[in-house]
Amino acid sequence: MKIQAAIDRVTLDEAQALSKKLDPYVDIIELGTSLPKDYGVFALQDIQEQLTHAEMLYDLKTIDEGDYEFTQGYRSGADILTVMGASSKATIEKCLKVAKDCHKQAMIDLMEVDDEKLAEIADFPEAIYCLHHSQDAGRDTNPAGTVAAFHEKYPHLPHIAIAGGVDLESTRALADQGLAEIVIVGSKLVKTPDPVQSAIEFQEAKQ
Amino acid sequence: MKIQAAIDRVTLDEAQALSKKLDPYVDIIELGTSLPKDYGVFALQDIQEQLTHAEMLYDLKTIDEGDYEFTQGYRSGADILTVMGASSKATIEKCLKVAKDCHKQAMIDLMEVDDEKLAEIADFPEAIYCLHHSQDAGRDTNPAGTVAAFHEKYPHLPHIAIAGGVDLESTRALADQGLAEIVIVGSKLVKTPDPVQSAIEFQEAKQ
């Protein structure tokens, strides 16, 4: 299981400094949507280029123009890019095609995707499906339960990421469960007084 | 009826030059999603500041974190920002609250919004509802027919924008119809050999 540290709503300089510090201690560094939207993907390449260990994810939240946005994102250094499950299926297919052509990965963000739409887009076993609750909706989350329910319904989709309210305890539960490939941790890792120490604790929790 | 010229998939310098040229001849300049995503909203402010006539729209396509993205967008000079209708209702409400607080406007992009979701988010008469077909879906469009169908179903929503395949002929039809407040024109205005001349023709078509 990989630990993905989500850096968001900071300046470009802060994102650069934090990425460099966390690089040896996490598996994936996510630059949250505020960073591409405030500074643009071109500006993010400098941050990616300094990484020596972690993979780089830009949370683009593409919802249209899949071809263009994914091409720009991978060119600017991302290993993984995100597309909204709420996009048209054609958009998702375009994103996955660009990912394949670039030998990179695509993550489908299932925020605000209902069961009907999910069934329609559940035939991409190469994609990472990100179970995720909107930050604005403010619902309670039970990460391991959410993953179990998804896996039961879609056992043919092997790449599962889970975001939203993940702490050390739920990371342990997810590691024991063995279904999620990626746990996405935000404030509970990057907004603590010592993010490196927090990252080490999350790595220990997943053992 | 306002003519909105959508500038997209060009460099920042090209967007700046084209915005300046079109400013006197269109009502709204849209910087399409590629511009905030490639360069970030902070970089767009220089373009907005040179406008003397047209309003400025950044096509942010916000789908989460409505508070943050709309605050950043208006601070960076936008008069109008876009939020996806496919967002949670809470996200749309947050965007509209920021718009109101900043005395600016918000546009709800109805791409990939089905009838059920539309009914759920059809109670914001202050918002501009943008009828829009995904560029990836490749469907045929009949702008005036699309507007008429929307108006019949939601007569209490007075602010309608229409995008996708709008040409001079459909602009005339939309002007005669008198329902749409904004017509969004992309390649048929900005990608012609003489965009200023094209803008003048669109302004004549709406008379």
Image (tube, coloured by chain):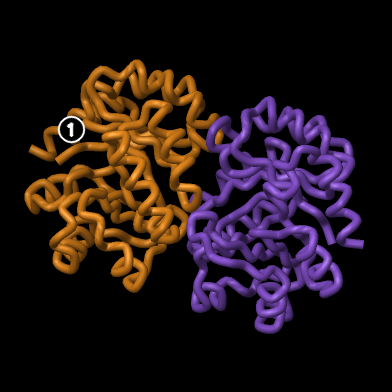
Chain colours: A purple, B orange
Q: Amino acid at mark 1?
A: Glu
- Inspect this view and state whether residue B169 appears: no
Instruction: Tell me residue A20's x, y (percent).
Output: 81, 32
Instruction: Say which of A192 and B20 sits in front.
Output: A192
Q: Is residue B167 above or below residue A147?
A: above
Instruction: Tell me residue A156's x, y (percent).
Output: 73, 78
Name the quadrant containing residue A148. Answer: bottom right
| Mark 1, secondary structure of its residue | helix
Left or right of residue B178: residue B32: right
Instruction: Say which of B206 and A195 sits in front.
Output: A195
Instruction: Say which of A154 and A29 sits in front.
Output: A29
Write the residue at 82% across / 39% down.
A22
Q: On the image, numbered disc 1 is attached to which residue?
A: B201
Left or right of residue B49: residue A4: right
Name the quadrant containing residue B145. Answer: bottom left
The quadrant of the image that shows the N terminus of chain B is: top left
Write the residue at 65% across / 28% down.
A12
Left or right of residue A81: residue B80: left
Write the residue at 28% across / 24% down.
B22
Instruction: Tell me residue B174's x, y (percent).
Output: 14, 50
- Inspect this view and state whether residue A189 appears: yes
How many numbered marks are there? 1
Chain of residue at mark 1 = B
Left or right of residue B75: residue A69: right
Instruction: Tell me residue A188's x, y (percent).
Output: 72, 50
Q: Is residue A81 above or below residue A1?
A: above
Q: Residues within 10 Å of mark 1 (few under 14, many from 20)?
A: some
Instruction: Say which of A111 and A83 sits in front.
Output: A111
Write the residue at 72% across / 53% down.
A185
Name the quadrant containing residue B122. Answer: bottom left
Q: Is residue B21 above or below residue A202?
A: above
